Amino acid sequence: MGWQERFSLAGRRAMVTGASKGIGAEIARVFAEAGADIVAVARDRAGLEQTASAVRAAGRRCLVVPAELGAPEGPGQAARTALEAWGTIDILVNSAGIARVAPALELTFADWEATMAVNLRAPFLLAQALAPAMIAQRWGKIINISSQTGVIALDDHAAYAASKGGLNALTKSLCAEWARHNVQVNAICPTVILTPMGREVWGAEEKSAPLIAATPARRFGEPVEVADLALYLASPASGLVNGALVMIEGGYSSV
């Protein structure tokens, strides 16, 4: 198998959550360019349609599934829609996420619950719904978009960090159960990525400058850099990578 085949997603069907913008939209586009058909899931139908246009421009199919992943029934409904339409989803990318940033003493119960529902519960419910078909065909890839804050501490991120730390633990637990069925479960842990959400939280120079200064690469990331790493984890090239927490944060956790 040549290198192009090893990194190809030809014939695969991928569900990408948070696909209306930011990292999710970029992953959907990159996966389509690599040959995958895309199930695009998010709340924002207009944003999903833009993603669908990019996927179709790459010559691939796109199923648009508006969903509220923070609702208890949202992930299951999205999974059923995809399975009824396409039978099997080969690749799941849990990219949808929210960040409710506040000092721990000021964090509200509602913000804590909403963060856990979207960032941790929804990825589990989607994996639980889609994994049986992956196990049956003995091939599947689950990629959780986590965060460096799931590994290291940042001020004002108690709920977000807890949700991402939980997502990292979930990644390893699912690997332990499903690796024997040739289902790989990995997590990507980025630094701040310059998406609309990233710019909203970290746009102020007085906030971003200390984190950039503490990062050896002296910069934040771009969505395509996360998408390219996700492509590797979704492709045959990463066949032995399982249960990994892959840091993509310019060396922040190395110093």
Image: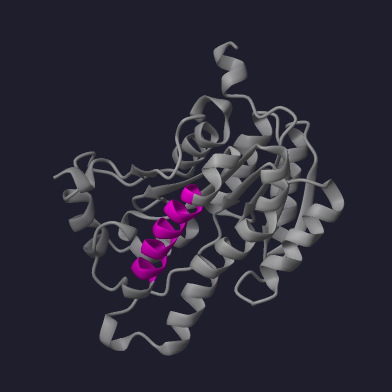
Q: Position of residue 127 (x, y in %)?
A: 61, 56
Applied colour scheme: one colour
Q: Which residue is situated farthest in the top direction here?
A: 2
Q: Quadrant of residue 41?
A: bottom right
Classified by dominant secondary structure, the portion drawn in magenta counts as helix
The answer to whether residue 51 is left or right of residue 254 is right
Tally of numbered tags: 0
Q: Is residue 43 left or right of residue 172?
A: right
Q: At 46% from the left edge and 30% from the top edge, which residue is drawn?
A: 240
Query: At 38% from the left edge and 55% from the top edge, which residue is drawn?
Result: 147
Residue placed at 18% from the left, 43% from the top?
Answer: 254
- As drawn, the residue found furthest toward the left would be 255
Task: State which quarter of the image contains the N terminus.
Answer: top right
The quadrant of the image that shows the C terminus is: top left
Q: Position of residue 15 (x, y in %)?
A: 68, 49
250 w.r.t. 112: above or below:
above
Q: Is residue 170 covered in magenta?
A: yes
* Residue at x 35% of width, y 85% of height: 107
Compared with 110, 123 (above or below) is above
In the image, the segment drawn in magenta is 160-176
Does residue 147 show up magenta in the picture?
Answer: no
Residue 192 in picture, x, y percent from top left: 36, 53
Q: What percent of the width, then of the height, locates residue 35?
A: 70, 29
Q: Nearer the viewer, residue 216 or 97?
A: 97
